[in-house]
Image: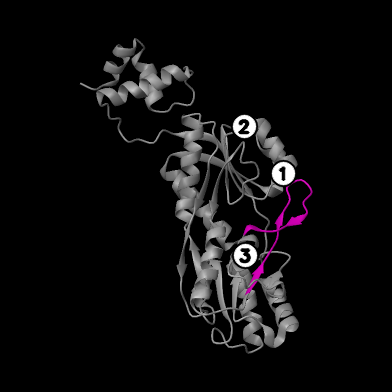
Amino acid sequence: MATIKRIAEILGISNATVSRVLNHDPKISVSEQTRAAIFKTADEIGYKKKDINPKIDNIAFLYWVEQHEELDNIFNESIVNELNKQAQARNISYIQYNKADGIRAIPKHITAFIAQGWFDDEEINYLKNITTKGVFINTRPDESVFDSVQANHESMVRQIVDYFISKGHQSIGFIGGPDYEMTSHKPIMDIREWSFRQTMSYYKILNEDSIFIADDFTTKEGYRIGKDAILKLKDRIPTAFCVANDALAIGALQIFNEQQWEIPKRVAFFSINDIGIAKYLSPPLTTFRIDIETICSSALDLLLERVFKNRTTTKTVYINGSPIFRKSC
């Protein structure tokens, strides 16, 4: 019969050691050879452990997101809420630390962490000195040390351009924002802008005059940069815009509506995120829905691998989205 006792007899170790290893007790100290032998023997004799999630504590959740107007925080807060729900279901207990607390508020004895938001070089080095068992959501500050889960923005932007091309658009613009260099804090090209440039160059229709980069990914900046586009291009406005996120798109739609541009007859908009308000805009916004549930479950899977299996090879996981077609296209 496949039991813990039988595994212990085969390997010549105690029942308690076998039980604690199979139940992923983080406090037990055994060699990697013994750990591997226990799992191998369990598989060989057909042992089936009850599907019970072991309690995991001493985890930190670092919420390093700049606070803007409420609308612009909806997407980030959705990740927090989903992560809380899934962590509770998996018996994972963590303490949340916010950017305002400062990086040195993170205790040096934590087992692992999940991080969301933007971290500078000094903060990353502080975390490296605490533990390498960290998972970043939607940023990847050091892929040689930490795991990360990313929304596949590169693919989404490419699909948006492909869609516009399939509908006959040849004049396509881009509204986006900056990324930042970790050490100098200087703005650099965001992956969504890079993907747009690459895809438009592939089709040989890239027009620098139709690329507009805001100072931030906010509704206010979307309104400002949309107004700049109208004033600069006038009748040469593209027939379609790929927009980096919904907050920017909402601001741009507002100014284009105020200036009485026909949407989508004269100019179409396709964005990314699918925040709740997107379907209530005028016109309702076509956008990519990012699978927040899968992002959070993947982040927790990576965390558990680092904690229980002591995986040292880092992983970066890209999560695709689904286009939600509404009347802005």
Q: Position of residue 327 (x, y in %)?
A: 49, 80
Q: Position of residue 90 (x, y in %)?
A: 42, 41
Classify mark 3: helix, strand or loop.
Answer: helix
Dot 1 corresponds to which residue?
102
Q: In the picture provided, is 257 more to the left or to the right than 15?
A: right
- Residue 274 visible to an observer of this rendering: no
- Toward the viewer: 5 or 135? 135
Q: From which residue to which does the magenta span run?
A: 173-191
- Residue 214 visible to an observer of this rendering: yes
- Upstream in sequence: badge 3 or badge 2: 3
Residue type indicated by callout 1: Gly
Classify mark 1: helix, strand or loop.
Answer: loop
Dot 3 corresponds to which residue?
72
Asked if residue 235 is positioned above or below residue 281 in the image, the reply reads: below
Label at residue 131 = 2
* Residue 184 part of the magenta segment: yes
Classify mark 2: helix, strand or loop.
Answer: loop
Asked if residue 76 is positioned above or below residue 314 in the image, the reply reads: below
Q: Position of residue 321 (x, y in %)?
A: 48, 60
Q: Residue at (45%, 52%) from the top-left corner?
A: 294
